[in-house]
Image (tube, helix red, strand yellow):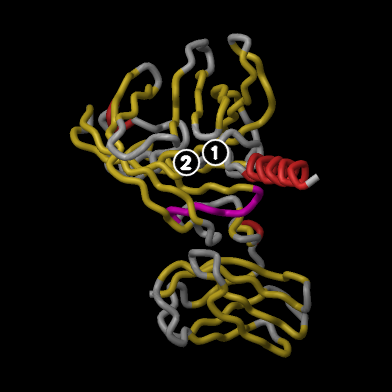
Amino acid sequence: MKIKFVLLAVLALCLSATLQAQTLVNENNLWSNLIEVSHNNYTLHFQQVKGDTIINSKACKKLMGSTSALLTNWKYEAALREPVPGKVYIINAGSTSEHLLYDFTLTVNSTFTGYYKECMYQMNLDAIENIYLLNGETRKQFQFSGTGASGFFTENWINEIGSDNGLTSAGIYSCTYVSDTAPTLNCFTENSIVKVYNNADFPCFSFVGIADDPASLTSQVNPNPVVDIAVIQLQDSNASNLRLVLFNSHGQKAAEFQYKKGNQLMFKRDGLPGGVYFYEVKSGTTQISKGKFIIR
């Protein structure tokens, strides 16, 4: 009986670990890639995993792409599969050739051989370290270096998220001469939670439950950037028992203020460090406004 109980416990632990394993090829993942199309002229390229497909008799997931900030007009870009956690393969649209896109099972001093489009490249894995994501979660970051079309380059991968050059741009600096500012992974969300946000000057999908769509904002911060004191001007608000909550760039609550009533909510910096902040205004449990500002 004891042996049977132990076996059942081990089986339960294995099943639990499998269910909780991180995977890149997941329909709950959403990427925003920042592309420099010309000097200081940027556009956003959104990607998500959506739907199933069969290629070369292998079960794959479709990788869809869009350039619409409304997250519409999705087009098929590639097929992805992750037969074991950590090894991600890609088949680009219009091709049947499969290449290894990511290998998160590598160890330090390993050499990764990959393809950017049809260009083969190699990178050396110099280090692996733990980093904190915006939601406080820790992930492994893989630090690579190599020499290619852009000369000496470095590239970082976050486990089961992808390259800092963008999801499908791993190896681009090895194969293509590009400037230092393009492309980059701007934002990554998993289950609607923002976990990576690299440039707050460009929109993300959501931020710890706070929308970052300027069209949806119902308030304005003055001055912005904030130096010492600022006022959040609400539009046509007669609500009472207001609560202003500030979040830092890691998604952690940085401050909270209470107001009886009014449409002008003044707050002081009170030692908050410089950086990007996100806020929400609630009346009771109802959110009536949200947005972001910068503290210098």
User: Which residue appears farthest toward the left when viewing the image?
Assistant: 151
Circle 1 residues within 10 Å: few <14, some 14–19, many ≥20: many
Q: What count of labels does the image hold? A: 2
Q: Quadrant of the N terminus?
A: top right
Q: Is residue 271 left or right of residue 153?
A: right
The residue tagged 2 is: 33
In this rendering, the answer to whether 60 lies above or below 261 is above
In this rendering, the answer to whether 140 lies above or below 212 is above
Q: Is residue 39 left or right of residue 244?
A: left
Mark 2: secondary structure: strand
Q: Is residue 146 left or right of residue 43?
A: left
Residue at 63% across, 83% down: 264
The residue tagged 1 is: 46
Residue at 44% across, 80% down: 272
Mark 2: which amino acid?
Asn
Circle 2 residues within 10 Å: few <14, some 14–19, many ≥20: many
Q: Please state the horizontal and vertical placement of residue 295, each as a whole percent of the image.
A: 43, 74
Q: Which residues are magenta?
A: 191-199
